[in-house]
Amino acid sequence: MTNSTAPLLDIAALYKLFPLGHKPSLFARARGAAKPVPHLHAVDNVNFQIMRGETMGLVGESGCGKSTLVRLITRLLDPSDGRIRLNGEEIGHMPAKGFGSSPYRPRIQMVFQDATDSLNPRYTAFDAIADPIHRLKPLPKAKLKARVEELADLCGLPQALLSRFPHQLSGGQKARVGIARAIAVDPELLILDEPTAALDVSVQVVILQLLESLKQRLGMSYLFVSHDLNVVRLLCDRVMVMYLGKIVEIGPAEAVFRQPRHPYTQALLSAIPHFEPGVESTRVRLGGEPRSPVDPSPNVCRFYGRCPKGEAACETTMPQLRPMAPQHQAACHLAQPDPDLLREVA
Ligand SMILES: Nc1ncnc2c1ncn2[C@@H]1O[C@H](COP(=O)(O)OP(=O)(O)OP(=O)(O)O)[C@@H](O)[C@H]1O
Ligand SMILES: [Mg+2]
């Protein structure tokens, strides 16, 4: 039984630390001469939920940990610690190696950034779409053909192209094959990691419209990773902003874009060009160097040093996410919650 008000995806205290360098030898450890291995904190105590039918956006600069988070959720990577629950069932503890053959695999699917890389060059479009269906449950030939054609129609891929190999398809057509393949096994959660980054602008629009209409028709939830903030604003119900492995702001997309609370979000959004006449964009330029993600101090805000507002507390206490407005949280000592919210809490 699924409970429609319970989150579809529930991520709690999730970590991924990559060791840098080799483990010290047994001999070195026995002599007490082993130096601790440094770790890169790619995902560092991340908590969030995605509800049924919701589109959650994930934004943040290159290297902040978006793809690592996605790879943890799709169970291509094992977490260092934390919980990943799908429909209340723990899937984070299952080794990534065995996840591909588990009954949970079809329920989370992924659309990759570059369809060219993710499609097997020796598979026709038909084979690529049929493959996940066949792996889940072999179907008689006629039924499989009918299902693949149905998926091609759903994704706007002419059936005449099903016999073509990836190199015989355009970027937009390959994107449609990638999407048809991802939805072939009726996933509940579709994860899109920069799904249109490799396409030119006019094709991007068409593919985004396709994704939006598929979501309405099939009732899936999306986790949508993108550098294109205008697209995130249009497509997403809520948005999370990530900075050096941590979620620094999360809230309804409309609220985050209208009134960003974290100085990093403010800087990120100030870079969006405005085309409306009379609207001036005052771009916040960040100075300083990003802090290192290798063994970062647990007490210093990750944005300290680059933050235009940083003060003493930021160097001694890691800010935690706290309410700013209804359903809107930010992790900054200096962010101001709505006065109404403070009255409600008091
Ligand atoms: N297998 C790995 N081993 C060691 N470090 C890794 C590994 N995979 C990722 N990282 C590091 O983890 C951090 C997060 O990388 P990730 O690919 O998740 O960033 P991203 O936000 O997806 O960036 P982009 O926007 O460029 O795609 C980076 O510092 C990266 O170098
Ligand atoms: Mg990435």
Image: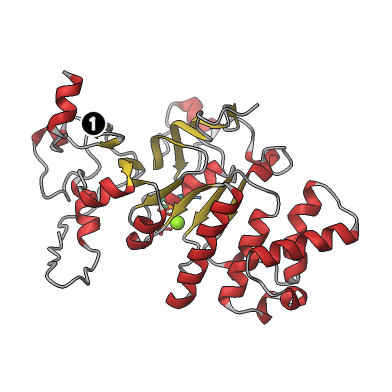
Mark 1 Cα shell of 10 Å, populated few (<14), some (14-19), many (≥20): few
Q: Please name whichever residue, 50 or 77, is drawn nearer the observer in this view of the structure.
A: 50
Quadrant of res 119: bottom right
Residue 28 percent coordinates (x, y): 49, 32
Task: Classify the position of the C terminus by image quarter.
Answer: top left
Quadrant of res 91: top right
Q: Is residue 160 above or below residue 289?
A: below
Q: Is residue 263 above or below residue 28?
A: below
Residue 146 percent coordinates (x, y): 81, 62
- Residue shown at 22% from the left, 45% from the top: 303
Residue 103 percent coordinates (x, y): 72, 37
Task: Classify the position of the N terminus by image quarter.
Answer: top right
In terms of secondary structure, where does tag 1 sit?
Answer: loop
Residue at disc 1, CB closer than 8 Å to ligand 1: no
Quarter of the picture for ligand 2? bottom left
Q: Please name whichever residue, 8 or 101, is drawn nearer the observer in this view of the structure.
A: 8
Q: Please name whichever residue, 318 or 229, is drawn nearer the observer in this view of the structure.
A: 229
Return the residue found at the far top: 346
Identify which amino acid the numbered label 1 is placed on: Asn
Q: Please name the residue that numbered disc 1 is placed on.
A: 299
- Residue shown at 40% from the left, 51% from the top: 236
Counting labels gives 1
Q: Is residue 198 visible?
A: no
Residue 300 percent coordinates (x, y): 21, 36
Left or right of residue 248: residue 66 = right
- Residue shown at 67% from the left, 75% from the top: 166
Q: Is residue 242 above or below residue 338?
A: below
Left or right of residue 145: residue 190 = left
